[in-house]
Amino acid sequence: MRPSKRFLLFALALAFTARLSADITTVYNFEHGTDGFDGNTSTSTLWASSGQHSLAIDATGSTGWNQNLAVNGSNNVDWTHAVEFLCDVYMPAGTKAAATYVQFIPTFSGPVNSFYQAGKVDLVDGVNHVALKINGSQITTPWKIYLILNTGGAIPGKIYVDDIRMRTPGKPGRLTLTLRTPYGSPVPGVVVAAGTAAVTTDSGGRAVLALPSDNYDAEVLGSDVVDTPFTARVPVGDGSQEVTVSYLPRTPPRRAQVVVRAGSVLRPFDADHVYGHNLAMWSGLDPFTNPIQKAKLLAIRTRLIRLPGGEYGNQWNWRTGGIFKQTADAPLDWTPEANWDVWKTFLHGLGPQTEALMILNVFQSTPQEQVAWIRNALDSGLKVPYVELGNEPDLDPNRYMSGVPGGSTVLSNYVRTVLPFARAVRAAFPNIKILGPVIAQIDDPVCPGKHPWDCYQYVNGEQVDNTRDNWIHKFLALYSSLGGPLDGVSFHSYPFYEKWDNHPTGYWDATQAWTKIPKLVPWMRRYEKWMAQYYPSQAGRMELGMTEFNMQVDETWATAAVEDAVWNAAYLGEFIRGGGTLATDWDINTEKPTDGGGHGFLDPNNDPTRPYAERARYWLYKMMANNFTGDLVRSTSSSPMVEVYAASDRGRVTVLLINHDENRPADATLYVAGAGDATRLRVMSLSRRNYLWSKVLYRAVLNLDPTVPPQVKVYGVPPERSGWRVYTQHLDPMSVTMAVFE
């Protein structure tokens, strides 16, 4: 079992006698007013954790996500050196039962990070002592502080907050760590992460942490050792501590025989459209304007961008730039800095080959307005090959469509609403392809008035094919019967979701995650069959678009670790094998420090020496977009733990090898036919040997580009015998390896 699966409880209970120094400062005590918190706020003497007053937040009737109840935009202090956010929250009896759940999410918006969530606390009735670890350098002096409430139902009354405090570290300290095996041998060459430091042990297994005195969540990371969490206790002055670290068991490599027939083409695929991306507007203005991000996107041959990205496609007014709530009266929620002019400048900056997949706002706009938006894009010189009919209409029964709450989950209402948009686009731009219905998961059933998972079916805890009609099938049947113009099906896929099997947050299981991959192609085959059935004159020419996808819904550490890249390599390979024509992953920049990960593959903020730091999935795209192109060709593997996909492009043959075993390496013997003109073999690999994600630092502590020397290896090609080139490639556990014959 991979050590990451055992890294669920973060700190060990160890005895501590060294002298520490840390300071707690009360920032807001509400004794003389609301201290700058506006919204539905007042002071109250009903409850206070100290003194006589608290901040009363009138949340009566609030349901779902509400960030406007208590906002401080006028009285903020410097949090740069803070390491913990503390406060007390009182929730009257009966509140949780009425609202199902109530989450308290303190969030800072400032010059470094426009939306930094300190954490998420599930409140209980009575007193809640909130303590959340934070990175003050991401906060500095914020523009605003939001005390966000997120609920499952309506809150019946007020919630009280008192004594908002910050904890800052103590005086300078120095801790010498010595890492030894259970047998007393030193453990050299591994990384110790704690506080803001990442230090590699020397030949004697020693690492020195120079940090302010405090107790730190810490961990030991390496490609050959068990991930080891511990508490680093940095005293004032000098101290020492020993940590026991175990090496992973040595297991003999699994043998696999891989056969590639480069002359046997399965299907061509358009790499410019398969390696596309979503860019979320909530990441702020900088991702649109920063030249570092631009250079890194160009390095992975970014050609297709879906905009405005995700749910904002249903809420964005392209003229004003505003995001509007999905309620009956649809008031303005907020206005991101990245308006339409910013979008156009960004897309043009990526080069003339860049194309836009535009999400039509079928929820709040009009056909005429969306046609005007497309025309504005085209007039500016942008290329627009595709539009989509909204975003995930099946997902949320609380959103309004056509004046009906949950209206988009009622398929007949969705079809009736989007038809005028599709017809207007077809009339104005006959060459732009129209895609729909953009469902949230590949197997979502028709589930009117509910979330789709409320209609999922399980056998022994495992989700099974539903007896209800599939959303796409019923959409195609109804939409085509009304003459709806359509050029392809688009869908989203986040197949591994631990909560569906009632696992704790942060759980990740490689075996279960990989069981989801083989389900993709059968669903794509069904889509093709249904499109041929309902649009027979376009059979064989309809698009199959996966316009959002990632390994899982929850943005835990697994979405930032090497596991994410390995899984997505296999999923992209399957998508291409299944005949997919366009794919835009989710996403470029989304961070979720409070959840431990984030779907974004470029991190703008959290590596102090590396702006827009690459995460594992970025390296996967750099490998694939520059090498895995052209035609998908026939390939097989003798081992179910070693997947293989192969592509041929103008004489270059690329073999993609995936070892998804967490513990055991593999030796794959490759038999490659059709690479007779190759003069060299270029091999690159992504694994824990060149990428290590730290949970405690929320960044990679080993982050090497697998596509450049010395990571990439170049060899002479093995000799050709009877039309075959044969050689053996070693595959690390949980790795992606690419062998390029050129």
Image (cartoon, rainbow, N blue to C red):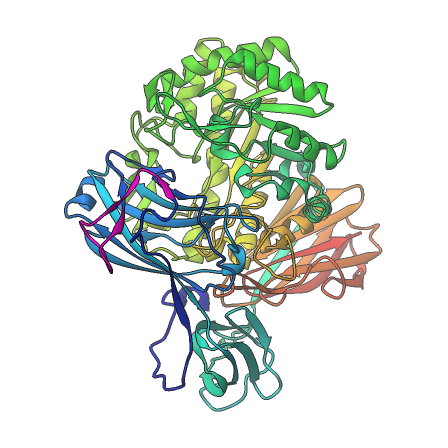
Counting labels gives 0
Residue 338 as seen in the image, left or right of residue 297: left
Q: Quadrant of the N terminus?
A: bottom left
Residue 159, horizontal then vertical, whole percent = 24, 46
Q: Residue furthest front?
A: 32
Q: Residue at x 43, y 34 (%)?
A: 440
In percent of width and height, residue 435 lies at: 54, 23
Looking at this view, is 247 or 257 the one in front? 247
| Residue at the bottom extreme of this rendering | 184
Please say whether residue 47 is one of the residues in the magenta stretch.
yes
Q: In the image, residue 171 lies at what x, y percent? A: 49, 78
Depth check: give the residue in front, 51 or 171.
Answer: 51
Residue 95 among magenta residues: no
User: The magenta stretch spans which residues?
Assistant: 37-55
Q: Is residue 572 visible?
A: yes
Q: Is residue 639 visible?
A: no
The structure residue drawn at horizontal position 48% and vertical position 39%, both measured from the top left corner, is: 520
Q: Nearer the viewer, residue 554 or 538?
A: 554
Considering only vertical position in the picture, is 22 above or below 387?
below
Figure check: 382 above or below 710? above
The quarter of the picture where residue 428 lies is: top right
Where is residue 687 drawn, in percent x and y?
59, 62
The residue closer to the viewer here, 330 or 312, is: 330
Residue located farthest toward the left when viewing the structure as drawn:
93
Q: Is residue 351 left or right of residue 700?
A: right
